Image (cartoon, rainbow, N blue to C red):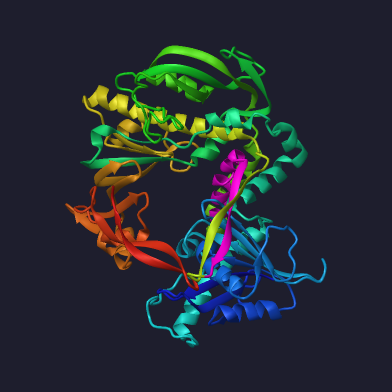
Amino acid sequence: MILTADFETTTEAPARVWAIGLCEIANPDIFIYGNSIDWLFDWLINSEESHTLYFHNLRFDGQFILFYLFTHGYEWTDEKNLKQGQFKTLISDMGMFYSITVCFEDGGKDDKKEVTFLDSLKILNFSVKQIAKGFGLPIMKGEIDYKAERPVGHILTQEEVDYLRNDVQIVAMALAVLFKQGLKKMTAGSNAFHDFKTTFGKKHFEKMFPIPENDKEIRKAYKGGFTYLNPAFAEKEVFDGHVFDVNSLYPSVMYFKMMPFGVPVRFTGRYEDDKLYPLYVQRIKCQFELKPGKIPTIQLKGNLAFIPTQYLSDSGDEIVEMTLTNVDLKLFFEQYEVYNIEYLDGFKFMGAYDLFKDYIDKWTAVKIGSTKTKNAAMRSLAKLMLNSLYGKFSLNPKVQSKVPYFDRVNKVVKYKLGPEEEREPIYIPVGAFITAYAREVTIRASQAIKDLSIKKYGKDMYIYSDTDSIHTLLPVEDVETIIETSDTELGKWAHESDFVAGKFLHQKCYCEAEIVSDEEYESLLADEETRSRCTIFDGVKTFLKVTCAGMSSGCYKYVTWENFRTGEAFKGKLLHNNVEGGAILKEVDFTIK
């Protein structure tokens, strides 16, 4: 049986499960519950079949499961085939929980009884509340007092039972939508990748995307999204701004841009035009200096002379080595004066425009169709499938797992790193070019906004870029003359929002008093979590939208326009602590740095 599961746990050490709910995904009306982790394992052990249980955030609930296993005589193993009383785990070196599998009975292949605990958060990367809303479900997440005293043997109140039922039913209903489409892999990326290979054809895929022998060298050209704050606006208050977002940035470049395929061909020196191999990554050595009025686009990682997250205005006295796609290289020459360049070598690729067309057409049609029929569940699934594919091509072949063990002195589950392992990569050239094209889209639009504002108004009105969005003071009618806009069209810029005032402290750290409709304002005002950030500015209804890397959503209600500043501390950050019995979330302050 495949079920969703949820623990409710005490908030002080030693930690304890005081409620457990289970819901069958194929039939969400089937719901059972208990009031201890012993109840769960008794139910699993006495069941006549194997089960799969999805917890929404296995990293937390998994601590209770592992504590139970270690304290009840179960033994961790790295063997593929489990024997009775053994369990295995899949936990990344970053502490991401993917699975825990336990063997209760080892009676041969047909009689073996196991339970596998999986993480639905890896498939649906949203809160339970967001899932209910996004999938248009007939039930919503409830509220209970987490800090109330609940002794051992506590009999659940009807309110607690209803809360528990809603939590597991919401996730079950959402997973059922995916399962009906045959999407039963462990992560959203794996689901998208499996569906793409099915659409594309497995044999065709292997022919077009052979595993590259030179993954390590080509991977140096793979970089993330473009996130940059114009220094002119750092730590400043700005007024009357606008936000533009690209409609499905990564799917759009996969759809419209030439993508690499086939076996990479090495070349030495400088790439020479080759109609059969029009795409390439080039390794160079050089010095550089940003041209006047240009936005910097180069970061240098793995070089101790430079801060890896900082976009550089020059290379100083260093002659630096870089590996760039031809997309990045062209931008590099446009933005910088380049000196003492030496072309070392690189790899070239065949290219095509329609590699991802069928897949994107398929899920775009689902998205459009479900929007028309108001099927929120299928619309959310389509968006998930469109945005989850690209990252899979960049899968890192080097992996290292964490191995759980039990500290008997402190009575707590701890972890140690296992040996480094290698798995087969998929096709890093695609990942490198998708992200390069995406950066190009955002950088070129950002530069165009900067140039026009200086030319027309004599001042820089470009504020900030974050992957697929641009924040600017340039009037909307001016922006629309230099970038293509549409609320829905793939790859075009949507006028996402307007803000009365904004503060941008640094990358990934800003707030905006966003203009909202009367209906939105009333809804936000009615929610205890968002009420404090609702304000009327000169008769305009606004909501203080906060983006701050590392800040928990629990901090947001304490943020105001006045106190959003560097050095300010906010209550509400929940810190995960492993303790006797499992884990607790300890509230600590978050400080903006």
Spot occupied by residue 313 in the image (x, y as percentages of width and height): 33, 24
Residues rendered magenta in the picture: 379-408
Residue 484 as seen in the image, left or right of residue 237: right
Q: How many marks?
A: 0
- Is residue 15 among the parts visible in the rendering? yes
Q: Which of the 4 image quadrants contains residue 289?
A: top left
Q: Which of the 4 image quadrants contains residue 55?
A: bottom right
Spot occupied by residue 469 in the image (x, y as percentages of width and height): 39, 40
- Is residue 519 among the parts visible in the rendering? no
Spot occupied by residue 431 in the image (x, y as percentages of width and height): 57, 35
Residue 427 as seen in the image, left or right of residue 457: right
Compared with residue 427, is residue 543 higher up or lower down, i.e. above or below? below
Residue 530 as seen in the image, left or right of residue 535: right
| Residue under the image location 36 percent in, 59 percent down | 553
| Residue under the image location 24 percent in, 32 percent down | 232
State which quarter of the image contains the N terminus. Answer: bottom right
Residue 302 as seen in the image, left or right of residue 111: left
Q: Nearer the viewer, residue 372 or 292?
A: 292
Q: Is-magenta flag for residue 164? A: no
Q: Is-magenta flag for residue 397? A: yes
Q: Nearer the viewer, residue 393 or 512?
A: 393
Compared with residue 473, is residue 447 higher up or lower down, i.e. above or below? above
User: Hey, which residue is sitting farthest front in the picture?
Assistant: 409
Compared with residue 401, is residue 269 higher up or lower down, i.e. above or below? above
Spot occupied by residue 333 in the image (x, y as percentages of width and height): 43, 17
Q: Which of the 4 image quadrants contains residue 147?
A: bottom left
